[in-house]
Image: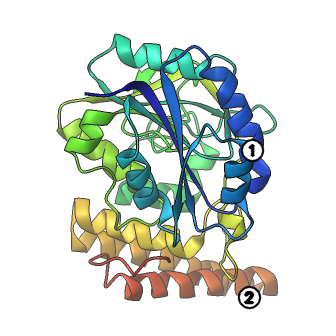
Amino acid sequence: MYAKDLSILIVTYNSRPFVDALLDGLARQIDGLNAEVVLVDNASHDGTADAVAERHPGVRLVRSSQNLGFAAGNNLAARHAQGRVLLLLNPDALPARGCVARGLALMNGDAGVGLAGARLLADDGSTQPSARMFPTLMQEAIVLSGLAARFPRSRWLGRLDRTWADPAHAAPVDWVPGAFALVRHDLFDRLGGFDERYFLYYEEVDLCRRIQAAGFRVQYWPELRVHHIGGVSARTVAGATVARSGSQLTLWRARSGLLYYRKNHGWLTAWAVNRLERSWHALRGWRAALRGQADKAAESATHLGLLQRAWRDTLGGRVAPPRPW
């Protein structure tokens, strides 16, 4: 059915500074494997697609005329892929030597795993959240309150990012980030791929829910190590507000969060999550204003406005705005 054992899917948007190093490294990693690289360029304006075509002729390049986002971009890449296993890989994620081959071997060795992720490492070598649990209204409140950061070793307060767990231990988890994710092609197709209403964020959370509902596990394999910068494409979006972490677009994250909660938990939960965050930022802004912290008050006012806009844009999580966001 499949001509290849593995297809590596990369979706780029203004990623030219990173694709050369990534594709050069992948060429070495898949040497000797029955594998291919499929790259979808989401209408980059920095010459990413031309650079790939010129320097990496062995890559199957698909040029999109518009920015499709992460979900639809990967669905398009999957339609061009011939691999039995798909590896979703961000352009700013560099797998360690031998990581790709080992990941394929692990997938081949456990038919019960539908999707699996790696240990994501930041520039300083620290582990990024790599094995996570499904978000809930209660967990959103815990994170906003600061208790999750204050008590990361608590199994309850640190539940969302599993900060209580040893990142060196493999485990079945609720979901893993899409920066590096191995998924069975036939299962991906059977489930219809990503829900394309998510332009960016929450699409992998939603897919992992559906994979588990289909009877497969989502697995975290820390022996697969991947250096991940994070937020590279987000920072190239003109006029957008990026979260203080520097990796997420606030409006897009809020939109996708509403779509996710409305789809999986209903209207009331979507409303409650949005109002919870809005109330927290309203209180934060009021307190900052009283203390004369004008910058902090303005930041919360901006965040509050984006949350209100996200509610309007999605009709309370019922519809996705037209692409591109």
| Location of residue 281 in the rendering, given as x and y in whole percent from the top left corner | 58, 78
Q: Can you identify the residue that label 2 sits on? A: 290
| Point 40% across, 46% down: residue | 80
Q: Give the residue type that dot 1 points to.
A: Arg
| Location of residue 252 in the rendering, given as x and y in whole percent from the top left corner | 51, 72
Per the rendering, the mark at residue 55 is 1
Residue 319 placement, left or right of 275: left
**Which of the colour schemes (rainbow, by chain, secondary structure, one colour) is used?**
rainbow
User: Quadrant location of residue 47?
Assistant: bottom right
Viewer-proximal residue among 263 and 149:
263
Q: Give the residue type that dot 2 points to.
A: Leu
**Image height check: is 261 above or below 136?**
below
Viewer-proximal residue among 302 and 113:
113
**For the residues carrying marks 1 and 2, which lies nearer the camera in this image?**
1
| Point 41% across, 66% down: residue | 257
| Point 23% across, 74% down: residue | 267
| Location of residue 6 in the rendering, given as x and y in whole percent from the top left corner | 44, 27
**Image height check: is 303 above or below 74?**
below
- Image quadrant in which the N terminus is located: top left
**Image height check: is 300 above or below 182?**
below
Dot 1 lies on which element?
A: helix
